[in-house]
Amino acid sequence: MFSSSDQLVSTYSVCSDAAGVAGNLFAFVLFLSPIPTFRRIVTNRSTEQFSGLPYIYSLLNCLICLWYGLPVVAHGVILVATVNSIGAVFQLVYVSLFIIYGEKKRKVKMAGYLVAVFFVFAVVVLVSLRLFDHQTRRIFVGYLSVASLISMFASPLFIINLVIRTRSIEFMPFYLSLSTFLMSISFFAYGVLKEDAFIYVPNGIGALLGIVQLLLYSYYSRSLREDSSEPLMSSYP
């Protein structure tokens, strides 16, 4: 027979795993979101004016968070490793396409960035393995992952600012904002249930930014509908 404490632990485990799996699924939607851009790049055989830097940053972020999620660094958060391993593969493919279809100068630059990412990641792995015991290693890599995630979640601030300035939601697709919020809230719950601040703090920030994006989307989409319902002559003095 199971005691009430065993049942509580089992319930917590099921809930945390469910939150982690949900976070993986929503993250997968985010990883797929750039596909229309890369379909255009492959079709035109040119990277045009698209920037590859976001994918470089995302690759480094995924690698660091992947390292944090492995048992050699942190116990019991393997779903952090699974989502970031998938993310790293996607980002590597995207960066590779920039190298393949970019102009010669951009090819060299992107290849240099890619080498730098793997060099930084290798340094993080070697330093954390050689210089720290398991507990200190978790703290070291945990802080790096938090810094990396917060810098990634800070990028929507530029989009939020653009939406407010232009009063247009063109650059903030609804489903992308919704997926970001759902992924962040799922991993926030996962971190809380796992009692891991290195997971729930950055994802809590991401969830708050996701709420702001959804509220802005609701406000400006409603504003646009109201404007479009007014007579055309009302636009003129």
Image: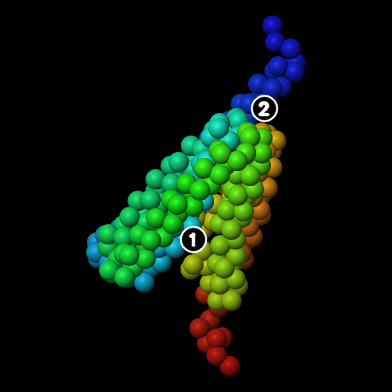
Give the residue number, with chain letter if any, for mark 2: 12
Q: Position of residue 4 (x, y in %)?
A: 75, 16
Q: Position of residue 52 (x, y in %)?
A: 40, 63
Q: Which one is nearer the viewer's eye here, 85 or 180?
A: 85
Q: Residue at x 49, y 52 (%)?
A: 120
Q: Which one is nearer the viewer's eye here, 140 or 150?
A: 140
Q: Which one is nearer the viewer's eye here, 218 or 131?
A: 131
Give the residue number, with chain letter if any, for mark 1: 173
Using a 10 Å C-alpha cutoff, classify the residue at mark 2 as few (fewer than 14 neighbours), some (14 to 19) or many (20 or more).
Answer: some
Give the farthest residue toward the top: 1
Q: Amino acid at mark 1?
A: Pro
Q: Position of residue 113 (x, y in %)?
A: 41, 60
SS for dot 2:
helix
Q: In the image, is residue 121 above or below residue 4?
A: below
Residue 53 makes an appearance in the image: yes
Give the farthest residue toward the bottom: 237
Q: Amino acid at mark 2?
A: Tyr
Q: In the image, is residue 115 above or below residue 168?
A: above
| Tag in front: 1 or 2 | 2
